Amino acid sequence: MKGVLPPRIDLLSDTLTRPTPEMRAAMAVAEVGDDVFGEDPSVNRLEGHISGMLGKEAALFMPSGTMSNLIGLLVHCGKGDEFLCEAGCHIFNNEQAGYAQVGGIGVRPILGERGALRVDQLQEMVRPENDHLPRTRLICLEQTHNRAAGSVLPYEVVAEVCDWANQQGLARHLDGARLFNAVVASGISAADWAQHFDTVSVCFSKGLGAPVGSALCGPAEKIKLARRIRKMLGGGMRQIGGLAAAAVYALEHHIDRLAEDHTKARVLADAIRNASGLTLQCDPVDTNIVIFEVAAEKGTSEEFCASLLKRGVRLYPISRQKVRAVTHLDVTMSECEEVAEMLADS
């Protein structure tokens, strides 16, 4: 907004990260070509790099995670089909129901615990073959789970759910916008997480710190179809090697440092845990997202955030009484400690 000074410490989202000087240098010297024709060498390098990391045959660079997820659904489902997902997931809540607007696809949300679904919840969710019913074709999981405060879905639960889904003839798609946060927090490789899914979407513009982009990874035939759908949606890009080079730099240099963001988030969580009138939504905090509830006597979440903004700190009021804080590359440990003191004294 014009006339409003930017906050000193911005914990609104990890999408706020800006390219580091080293990343900018990599972008400046990147080779470029026309990616719609498959001729951008930097994009081709990125797609080979990320598909290899995830153990998939192919990948496709996308301008956003929303497009990557939408196309992930469209390659598995047709009009009148239905997918299963956790009720708090990003695809269901924060992507404009693009699956319905564009694909004519239905959804069957199921409430999980800390973002995780169990097989016993899913047993009756697959529709039988019947002319009156939609066809259940797909299950989607989210790792880490944004609305569950960046919780890492337990590996054994993910494996069990995906094995069950496979037995039911369902495809599996992972919204892995913050998959590498789960990799660092769990010590489980990206390929091990990804092996349970047919398609995986990963984001470069959150904690990894690239300015733009996601990738959809999966079997070559699905990615070939995804490329066609991307063109239809207007996602075909031209000389974008600079953006791809930023994503490659992020993959090569910014994964391990995500542990720093997790430590910063725990500093905030410790303060909230001991503050009067504030309650952590998910405790313990697994990664870089902290969500807490503000007691009614302290006012609404918007009022609470407004009071902190006057002190130079921006948080995100996500509902009437809940607030989200996200740590990232551009916020230091000392700044998080300063915010922690404010929260403890609020």
Image: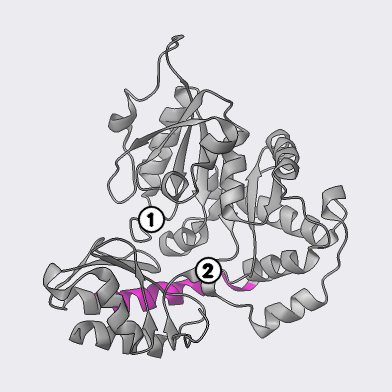
Give the camera-side residue of 304 and 210: 304
Which residue bears the numbered disc 1?
Answer: 152
- Disc 2 vs disc 1: Cβ atoms closer than 8 Å? no
Q: Is residue 41 above or below residue 118?
A: below
Which label was assigned to residue 39? none
> Relative to residue 214, is residue 84 drawn left or right?
left
Please tell me whether mark 2 sits on a helix, a strand or a loop: helix
* Residue type, mark 2 in image: Thr
Q: Is residue 115 above or below residue 162?
A: below
Which class describes the residues within 10 Å of circle 2: few (<14), some (14-19), or many (20+)? many
Precedes in sequence: disc 2 or disc 1: 2
Which residue bears the numbered disc 2?
Answer: 15
Quarter of the image where the C terminus is located:
bottom left
In magenta, the rendered stretch is 253-269
What is the number of callouts on the image? 2
- At a point 40% along the width and 69% down the height, the residue shown is 288
Mark 2 → mark 1, Cα distance in angstroms? 19 Å
Please tell me whether mark 1 sits on a helix, a strand or a loop: loop
* Residue type, mark 1 in image: Val
Camera-nearest label, 2 or 1: 2
